[in-house]
Image (cartoon, coloured by chain):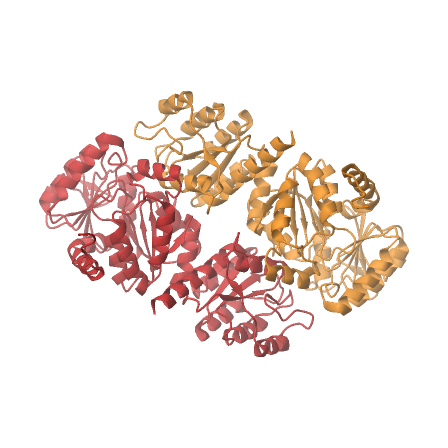
Chain colours: A red, B orange
Amino acid sequence: MPNPLTDSDIIIAGEVNQRVMSRGLDALLRPKSVAVVGASANPSKISNVMLRNLAAGDFRIIPVNPKEKEILGFECFPSISSVPGGVDLAIIVLPAESAVRAAEECVAKGVGVVVITSSGFAENGPAGKDLQARLESLFNGSGTRLLGPNTMGVFAPGNRLDTLLIPAEKSPRPPPGRVALVSQSGAVAIAFLEKAEAFDMGVSVCVCIGNKADIEEIELLERFSDDEGTDCISMYLESFSDGRRFLEAARRASARKPVVILKSGRSGAGARAATSHTGALAASSDTLVEGALRQAGVVRVYDEEELVDVSRALAYLDHAKGDRVCVVASAGGFGVIATDYVESLDHGFGLRMAELSEETRRRLASVMPTFSSVRNPVDLTAEVTDEMYDKVLEALQADPGIDCIMMSLELQPPNVTKGLIEVAARRRAAGSTPIVVSAFGGDDTRAILAGLEKSKVPSYPTIRRAVRAVAALVERGHYLERQK
Amino acid sequence: MPNPLTDSDIIIAGEVNQRVMSRGLDALLRPKSVAVVGASANPSKISNVMLRNLAAGDFRIIPVNPKEKEILGFECFPSISSVPGGVDLAIIVLPAESAVRAAEECVAKGVGVVVITSSGFAENGPAGKDLQARLESLFNGSGTRLLGPNTMGVFAPGNRLDTLLIPAEKSPRPPPGRVALVSQSGAVAIAFLEKAEAFDMGVSVCVCIGNKADIEEIELLERFSDDEGTDCISMYLESFSDGRRFLEAARRASARKPVVILKSGRSGAGARAATSHTGALAASSDTLVEGALRQAGVVRVYDEEELVDVSRALAYLDHAKGDRVCVVASAGGFGVIATDYVESLDHGFGLRMAELSEETRRRLASVMPTFSSVRNPVDLTAEVTDEMYDKVLEALQADPGIDCIMMSLELQPPNVTKGLIEVAARRRAAGSTPIVVSAFGGDDTRAILAGLEKSKVPSYPTIRRAVRAVAALVERGHYLERQK
């Protein structure tokens, strides 16, 4: 009997699965007690870094080390079983073999979630695969969940939970916010968080799934899809634990909020490299992956910077209702380059330049310098002022033929000031047509850009990146339109 | 008689032309006296900004303004004809009509080069076209050359010549160096210079050609091709003054040094926008442009950031002898993403991952942590040290099967220090296999990256940009190979 399951069967199976699987995630994301097994008193050790990163959290902190009485002022216990009371989250920072023994003890104690940071498991040849199988059998049927092994763990700035292995002074962390990240690589997660911080983009939670022996991307995707504190789900994946279930989960999540995925291992050599990195099994063909993700409503990106750029736009702004873009520049050259990126298919995004209505042309002509052209791209020239931006954006947002506005903001014009932040924030609040900014410049520019970010007007330091963000808003709009 | 010219005729015509046309460029690039016509004593005026920017130069500075006796301590003259002695360079900062009258006076005095910054010429409809035609007829047959109109002029940090209209405190300038820029847009030039400064990339000279009524890109391309102080010629163009002559010049220049071009107006709407920006006439088809540029050895780029990124790699490093790339990462995830960018044609650069020789594998295995994989991408894991990088790079540079090395440098590994700068500089000097770096991180990383740049090891903040730079080195190598 081919394909005995109907679509609704799959969905029901998924929902049951979700309820079963989600047990324990609260202990990972909102623990009341956090143990570090293998905690060291030596400040240069990773486990000590982790304790320092955790120290600000409002949960009980429990270092475990048979040789110490206390570390960083926290009472230290010789073993996890000797800890009085329950433990929600235990992070094991020990070499692979010892980590398995410690995990066994955690399971026996009934710890909520165990995180194993060490490598040397499925990514490490036959012996590692055996060790991971032993580990998995420990957790099977137990009430304890496992994150990893081979993972940096979890970062949840809202409750100051930070198990990342890098000191915050070496790698700046973003503030609490509304983008969730699931990453199969700790380093990619760190890069994401640093780039998010640079743009002041807040993060609700970041989970590094590593070898995903138990907790994997599907369960987390479902969890963040339901999470009211998350507006956009971003993922770095090298493999899918279960392609069909993943696509179902992505389809359900996409109907509620944007899902952005960087899926690597696209090339033959890349897929082989992914196998040796996290023991990932390669998908059969990247063309299939691309099509399936698109059908599920996922916005696919290709590098770590694009993951942050696109997430920021989708988390901050409504989708675009169509693909007609209006470019507003203060420097003609950037208007031309932006137009190329809007329209071109090769080195561009295949969108359309909007045709301005007669009414819009009339309104623009009344505020613009006489010698500038009332066309799209709109060239406001270096004579542009904050007030002119206000009136031009208002006119463009009133034009039903424009689905998205890209402002190429060269901040050298002498009459553009920090007042522009207020203008952009007001226009963002007033109109439904989304506005994306590209800008460059010295310290003055950076101050204005930081202000724009605070007002949730996403800005980008190059034309290409800004038009890429516009294209993501258009793609999201197309997807939602198709679902109607 | 179809095509009466042979190839060598064209070259000879080009050479004669070059000798004739190059008269005056010295007065533009190395003036002994610089007049600012329309100089204002008001510090908020553009002409005053320009005087301040010029004040550091070791040439005579001559403000011209009938209402002032002196400005910023420089003696002021009522008109250009009343200035005693010769004037190499006169920058006219007056509205279009007045600028034409002042230009007439400059021609009468025998000024070397006149720069007209104002817009309102060929880019501004029929009336502007007429005005530009009047301007051109003034210079025709005279000994005086014209840069512009509608231009920001020239920046030559070696002799502190800076006519750009933006204060240096608003837009940081790069140091003297070996990349020349020719730009048809002042704003794109400013963006280029700012991004160059951010990476400490030096510039030999930057000329903004604006409406290019006289001095245009071909003459400057020929000039910088001959210039021993320039290792790479970078251009932003919206149009070609003469496509055939340009390609001839590009072919001759490419044989001597890399030529990188951002040519906008690629799309239909982009080409129309270029016409209203600098009065540019659109090329017939961008596919033709793309093929012709490639055949002439030009490395084409598509945005302002890529223009700086690729110029930096080509100016600093030898070309790659083939397309076999070795990726060295300290974080597996980035090794996978880099591999995808190396190999993929879609969202990638269609290069090859090098096959490591037996000898190389043996040498790598002796220095690497046992659990890491001796494959390409090479995963050094977070245990990597400066010394390990040294030995690994040495082994890879000795492998004749590797044409280019990309180091993905995640600087969180605790044992990577500033010593890496010295390692990279030594490996750069010792081996002919070029090394390109991608890196991210906090302040520590930025300090190390700045040191790498000083050692002419180009580094990039994302994987994509680093592999793009590698692809440019490969493209340059292929071109030179074809010329043999």
Q: Nearer the viewer, residue B160 or B13?
A: B13
Q: Is residue B89 above or below residue A470?
A: above
Decide if residue A315 is in sight here.
yes
Answer with the quarter of the image where residue B273 lies.
bottom right
- The answer to whether residue A457 is left or right of residue A482 is right
Answer with the quarter of the image where residue A48 lies.
top left
Q: Nearer the viewer, residue B455 or A52?
A: B455
Residue A257 horizontal/vertical position (percent)? 33, 63
State the residue at coordinates (60%, 60%). B268
Residue B318 horizontal/vertical position (percent)? 58, 32
Q: Nearer the viewer, residue B429 or B2?
A: B2
Q: Is residue A159 above or below residue B27?
A: below
Answer with the quarter of the image where residue B200 lies.
top right
- The answer to whether residue B281 is left or right of residue B104 is left
Residue A349 horizontal/vertical position (percent)? 50, 57
Q: Is residue B108 above or below residue B352?
A: below
State the residue at coordinates (49%, 55%). A465
